[in-house]
Amino acid sequence: MDLDAIQPRFDQEDDAGYPFNLPIWQGLKSLDFSTPVTFFVGDNGAGKSTLLEAIAVQFRLPALTQMGVDRHPLMQGARDLAKALTFVRRPGGRSGKRRRGFFFRADDVTGYVQAMAETVEEHQKLEQHFDESLDGYGKILATGAARQEHAALTERYGENPFGRSHGELFLSLLRSRLTAPGLYLLDEPETPLSPTNQIALLALLMDAAQRGSQIVVATHSPIVMALPGARILDFDQHPPSPVEWEDVDHVSITKAFLSNPRAFLRHL
């Protein structure tokens, strides 16, 4: 465990600017993280993603976006928020081997994969250019370096990353980053995943937690948030409060709809 609690150092006011006017700050003294996996649930606009971004800023976690959490223009609110929060670390969390971490947002994946595909293509062109324009030992060194970089990228992302389905690509990226124990923040990772792949993601999270990682996930998926032993914080309550899986609105509405879809459709 890296993060024990988050405590605001400001009072929530209606006339305060974003993100300090979010309803989640009403009456919040401390948001505690008592289990290896914590889920943020609630409607869009409740503040789940903003708080995840603030944690990513505070811990300086790498992300798929090339600008990073320190420079991304759409994360200025999260950077302002991080300065106004106290992040309580678990005692002893800084000792021993340095832990890893990552901030994963579904919105960043397409741009990242596009950049990787362009990089693979550039290495292919460089390899061809060196092969045609150089000779001798210099040619061996230059083409070998370009070929090695191309092979490393291809091994990790495939020859054509866009040749796989969106869901397969998401799972592949998550598997390649949920490796060593660390702090991992996932913002709606279920977005492109089928129910079967959501179960695969659930298994991936369980495995990472068992190997010593702390994971915080903002999600709307009843499947993903069913992870045994996880703590679910409901951001539709002010302040966010723990809730049992069967009492989450997303779960109860989904179960009711699947039990009798015609009853819902009649109202529509």
Image (cartoon, grey):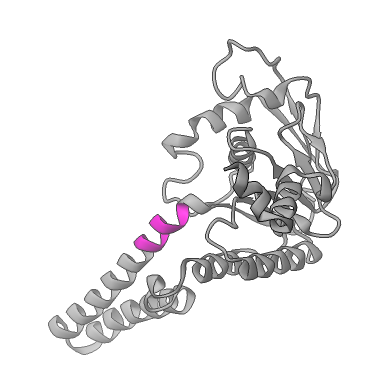
Q: Between 118 and 262, which is closer to the camera in this rendering?
A: 262
Task: List x then y, in percent, for residue 217.
Answer: 68, 50
Principal secondary structure, stretch drawn in magenta: helix
Residue drawn where x is 23% and y is 84% of the image: 139
Queried whether the magenta region covers residue 30, the answer comes back as no
Task: List x then y, in percent, for residue 209.
Answer: 77, 61
Quadrant containing the C terminus is top right
Residue drawn where x is 74% and y is 20% of the image: 26
Inspect this view and state whether residue 13 appears. yes
Q: Hey, which residue is sitting farthest left in the picture?
A: 133
- Tell me: 151 left or right of 225: left
Task: List x then y, in percent, for residue 108.
Answer: 46, 52
Task: List x then y, in percent, for residue 121.
Answer: 28, 72
Residue drawn where x is 71% and y is 23% of the image: 25
Q: Hey, which residue is sitting farthest top in the picture?
A: 15
- Tell me: 7 left or right of 47: right
Residue drawn where x is 41% and y is 63% of the image: 113
Queried whether the magenta region covers residue 112, the answer comes back as yes
Q: Hey, which residue is sitting farthest front in the picture?
A: 266
Q: Between 64 and 230, which is closer to the camera in this rendering?
A: 230
Q: Between 143 and 155, which is closer to the camera in this rendering?
A: 155
Inspect this view and state whether residue 98 appears. no
Magenta residues span: 108-115
Q: Hey, which residue is sitting farthest bottom in the picture?
A: 136
Q: Does residue 101 sit above or below 81 in this rendering?
A: below
Q: Does residue 188 sit above or below 161 in this rendering?
A: above
- Tell me: 258 left or right of 65: right
Q: Does residue 185 sit above or below 161 in this rendering?
A: above
Q: In which quarter of the image is residue 48?
A: top right
